[in-house]
Amino acid sequence: MVLLLCTASLVSAALLAALAPAAAVATALNSPYHFDPLEHLGGVTPYFEPQDPPNSPAPPEGCTAERAAYLVRHAAIYVNDFDFEEYIDPFISKWENKTGIDWAKIPDLDFLAKWTPPVSEAEEELLTRLGKLEATQLGISLSFRYPRLRLPQRVWTSAAERTVKSAQALVRGFELRENTINVVEIYEGEESGADSLTPYKACPGYSSKAGSDESSAHLKKFTKPIVARLNSIAPGFNFTAKDVYGMMQTCGYETVVRGSSPFCSLELFTPDDWLGWEYTEDIRYHYNVGYGNIYAGAFGLPWLSAVGDLLKADTTEQDLYISFTHRELPPAVLVAMGLFNNSEFSEGGNVNDTMPLDRINGRRAWKSSHILPFLGNIAIERLNCTGAYGYADGAYYRALVNNAPQPLPECGDGPGTSCSQAGFETYLQDRAALFGGFSEKCGVEYKNSTDVLDIYTDPTVGNGTMVGKRSISSF
Ligand SMILES: *[C@@H]1O[C@H](CO)[C@@H](O)[C@H](O)[C@H]1NC(C)=O
Ligand SMILES: *[C@@H]1O[C@H](CO)[C@@H](O)[C@H](O)[C@H]1NC(C)=O
Ligand SMILES: *[C@@H]1O[C@H](CO)[C@@H](O)[C@H](O)[C@H]1NC(C)=O
Ligand SMILES: *[C@@H]1O[C@H](CO)[C@@H](O)[C@H](O)[C@H]1NC(C)=O
Ligand SMILES: *[C@@H]1O[C@H](CO)[C@@H](O)[C@H](O)[C@H]1NC(C)=O
Ligand SMILES: *[C@@H]1O[C@H](CO)[C@@H](O)[C@H](O)[C@H]1NC(C)=O
Ligand SMILES: *[C@@H]1O[C@H](CO)[C@@H](O)[C@H](O)[C@H]1NC(C)=O
């Protein structure tokens, strides 16, 4: 019997090895190596749910969500202006100029003989079809997830076109009848204090360049062998670190524009190359909007405090509070919440040491691809638990990031990953003690600043504009 099993596994191992796709490396039975670059593209990662950690997204036994708040990054765009001007366009223009290279003869780059660029300057920052579809799908998913909750009357968004269109697309997935849900646009001002969905723009201490130097150090290191390899297979093009970076970035953008991209090939760039690219981005976001940025918690806290109050309140106008913003805010909110903290279980160390620039910390919690893909989202739910074994009946709270439940630091006294009413109140106070005081921490000098985000309750914010389900012109 034992012998038989053994033989059977040998046979299936051999079969698996034979069936494995070219890029996969056969390893042990049941553990074929698998790698998808589209799950490692930092800020240009198409939406996916990494199950990090793999807890079930279903509410714990005996609990039902009775209110929830969501903060969502806009969905997939054609290209970000900085990425286009800094990396992608220079590569494209070099490729267009260097007409002397016979790409068709170069393995792994032969597609460049017939390639056409998927994006141009005219499309910078515009939402793609896929982005609209995914935002609509999120609306439908939320309606499935919360069948007992009232549909929202209003959905909030920062005022840029890509965030507004994402909010409208979500509403179209939510609405049962036309013109029943409004989208409220919040001005992206530089003097809004904490009272906007883009508070980093009103935080003078914050620089959008933070993290560039640190990420460049790792960029240089990881691209060195790739540059050497490409220059040996395609002499004359003079590939640079920036070209390599832009080509890998194009994998993400071209995929969300066209559905696939030859730049994603694992023959062209190996899994380790992609991991180097991803880590370069993780370093950037660590210093830009993460634990290595001294302003991140201060501009992330106001959203946490505002929705914390709404979730705790006895009654609220809406059951669901959904807001759209740009890539900077969700990671900063995670810092304010203490989630994806590389130092969580190593008291005392300097968090910057957890993101070395000369090698990859493969065990980091801070992975931008898991935190801020297009449409990346953070949810906080209020649960009503009755008859959860081992817990008193009552209100509990839990957080999810891209649909994966996240245990809150020092707040785990409820069923599953949730936290009790009293625990949640203490948690919110502790986080406010760490990061409260937006205006002071950000070095605000304009006179009329505020430390509070109150767009959800301030009547002067208004009711926004209805979103017609079938209005083709705006879809
Ligand atoms: C490509 O050629 C154009 C026109 O000669 C020039 O303006 C541009 O700088 C060149 N770009 C690169 C990357 O060489
Ligand atoms: C402060 O005043 C400026 C200019 O009028 C305005 O744009 C901004 O929204 C105000 N800030 C707050 C927090 O009301
Ligand atoms: C290759 O590109 C680098 C960076 O743009 C430049 O400094 C160098 O002169 C180029 N070399 C050749 C041979 O074109
Ligand atoms: C991490 O580095 C940033 C940027 O240099 C710095 O502002 C911050 O204070 C550092 N954090 C710690 C804990 O040393
Ligand atoms: C990250 O975790 C460490 C260790 O528990 C803790 O000292 C630090 O305050 C945490 N950072 C934040 C912003 O919560
Ligand atoms: C919680 O659920 C129970 C059972 O469905 C219900 O009786 C109770 O009113 C709910 N509590 C709240 C605060 O909604
Ligand atoms: C917003 O809608 C509410 C409820 O429908 C209504 O009472 C209020 O007057 C409206 N506010 C504005 C500024 O239109």
Image (cartoon, helix red, strand yellow):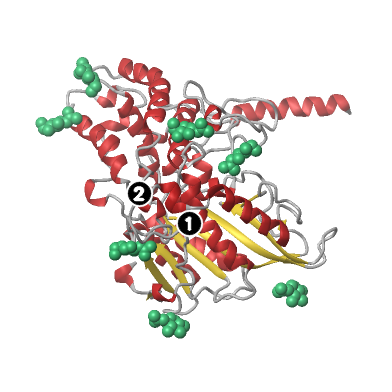
Residue farthest to the right?
1
If the picture is divided into quarters, which one holds ligand 2? bottom left
Residue sitting nearer the eye, 29 or 153: 153
- Please give left or right for residue 38 compared with residue 382 in the image: left
User: Of the numbered discs in the image, which one, if any, rests on residue 257?
Assistant: 2
User: Of the numbered discs in the image, which one, if any, rests on residue 72?
Assistant: 1
Is residue 420 placed above or below 351 in the rendered structure? below
> Residue at position x 36%, y 44% from top?
253
Q: Using a 10 Å C-alpha cutoff, classify the residue at mark 1 as few (fewer than 14 neighbours), some (14 to 19) or many (20 or more).
A: many
Distance (Cα) linking label 1 and label 2: 20 Å
Q: Earlier in the sequence, mark 1 or mark 2?
A: 1
> Residue at position x 27%, y 36% from top?
86
Is residue 294 placed above or below 151 in the rendered structure? above
- Please give left or right for residue 266 compared with residue 208 in the image: right
> Residue at position x 50%, y 58% from top?
303
Q: Is residue 231 visible?
A: yes
Q: Picture coordinates of residue 452 (x, y %)?
A: 47, 61
